[in-house]
Image: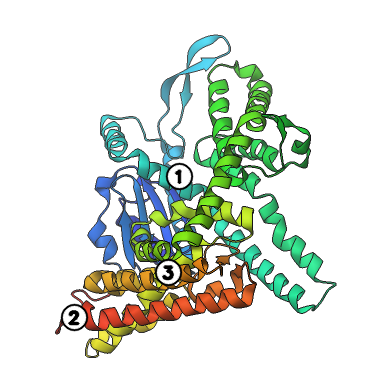
Amino acid sequence: MRNDPASIAAAVLARVGGPANVTSVAHCMTRLRLDVADPAAVDGEGLRGLPAVLGVVADGNSSLQVVLGPGIVVEVTAAVRIQVDEVTATAVATAPPRAAAVRTPAGEGTAVVRPTAGEPPAGTADQLKERLRQRNATPFKTALRRIAAVFVPLIPALIGCGILAGINGLLVNAGWLPGLTPALAAVASAFMALIAVFVGYNTAKEFGGTPVLGGAVAAVVVYPGVAKVTAFGVHLAPGQGGVLGALAAALLATRVEKWCRGRVPGALDVLLTPTVTVLVSGLVTLYGLMYAAGVVASAIGTAANWLLATTGALAGLVLGGLFLPLVMLGLHQALIPIHTTLIEQQGYTVLLPLLAMAGAGQVGAALAVYVRLRHDVSLRTTIRSALPAGLLGVGEPLIYGVSLPLGRPFVTACAGGAAGGAFIGFFAMLGDKVGATAIGPSGWALFPLLAGNRGPGPAAAVYGGGLLTGYAVGFAATYFFGLPRGSRLATSP
């Protein structure tokens, strides 16, 4: 089952209450992300016991993250979607008609309708399940989940364009292929120039609006003609506010659209609703949101630079040490808008190299466990299989397969991450900033994306020193303090 996506998908769905209990399906680099109608129907222990599942993160409400690892997660997600769509289509086709009050041009009336995909069928049991789901959904966790749903689908493009930008920078600095570098620059930069449109599209889609209307309003942020518009006494700049402005614009467009849908007569809806949505949201974006989002985005950049310049070592210590718990809980995706804002402003995010040190501490801790527990064949096999992914910055296999089940190695891995982050932060205080031109990869996979205020060479040297520091401290802390004698993994991976 480990290598068969369809079988893995079937096994996962059987333990989350069946395909009918799944209301949405998505994935990031390593995790299958599911929303379920009834959290009580999920068999968490059974899900964690599947051989292909590295870990499960449940936030207490309808959101569930199943850690599968890179590569396989894409295939399993596609298989899950197929099985969920089949069940949904069958349920919709066979559901008996039910009468419901609808708004018609002549006023209130009744019509025969069928439940749509994702809509809970009528009935007392389903109403109780929905009330349970709403009671467990805290605003903070729901907000983080929705932010992730907006930005996670953009990560593959950010990675691809970031790597191409790094390659192009090397070619330009070396003076090689001058006829090709302008084309590479165009290919690498086009997505970032229009990322606001994609953010707007995904935002409207996630919050229940028409995606293309969200994209249309967000496109105002990057339209060159906004340079002729004056707001608060100054001319606007194309791209002002960046992804934060696009996010706010699309949220507003969704609210305006929903307001119109409930008030515009059906015969005029197709004309008036899109027009009013784009007009109202577009004007508010120009004369308010772009300026406000620009102020917030500038504050983020200023705060990041100040933090590293004045408290770099301490900031790196804290960020590097706390990132593994964020990854374990699935909360690290909330940082994507900040990374994206920094990349838009400065060309790279200075936070990602610091956070990547958590993976270095994890690798060092795993190596220490491998050396200390030489008689635990099963655990050493798990480490050998998960270590290549860990070196490339994918930490979940080591987290859920090694350090977290053992307990103390997870803490000592965080200590290694803190040491690596402090190393990079110390050099930032000396004026050597290290950043990443894209988000997603870390570990050794981040080297092609490195940039800095003194060029890619010094940035790579500082980042490499941080990795080595994280490896060494993670190894030493785990070897001497992370494993009491006689330790063995309580459960087989």
The residue lying toward the viewer, choosing from 137 and 462, is 462
- Identify the residue under disc 2: 488
Residue 265 visible somewhere in the drawing: yes
Q: CA distance from mark 2 to mark 3?
A: 30 Å
Percent position of residue 423, x then y: 44, 73
Percent position of residue 74, x then y: 49, 63
Q: Earlier in the sequence, mark 1 or mark 2?
A: 1
Q: Which residue type carries mark 2?
A: Arg
Percent position of residue 385, x then y: 38, 81
- The quadrant of the image that shows the C terminus is bottom left
Percent position of residue 407, x then y: 22, 70
Residue beneath the point at 45% across and 64% down: 312
The residue lying toward the viewer, choosing from 66 and 221, is 221
**Would residue 172 appear left or right of 452 to someone viewing this image?**
right
Occupied quadrant, residue 201: top right
- Identify the residue under disc 3: 421
Disc 3: CA contacts within 10 A as few (<14), some (14-19) or many (>=20):
many
The residue lying toward the viewer, choosing from 367 and 92, is 367
Q: Which residue type carries mark 1?
A: Arg
Residue beneath the point at 31% across and 44% down: 61
- Identify the residue under disc 1: 146
Q: CA distance from mark 1 to mark 2?
A: 39 Å
- Judged from the image, the secondary structure of the residue bearing numbered disc 2 is loop
Q: Which residue type carries mark 3?
A: Gly
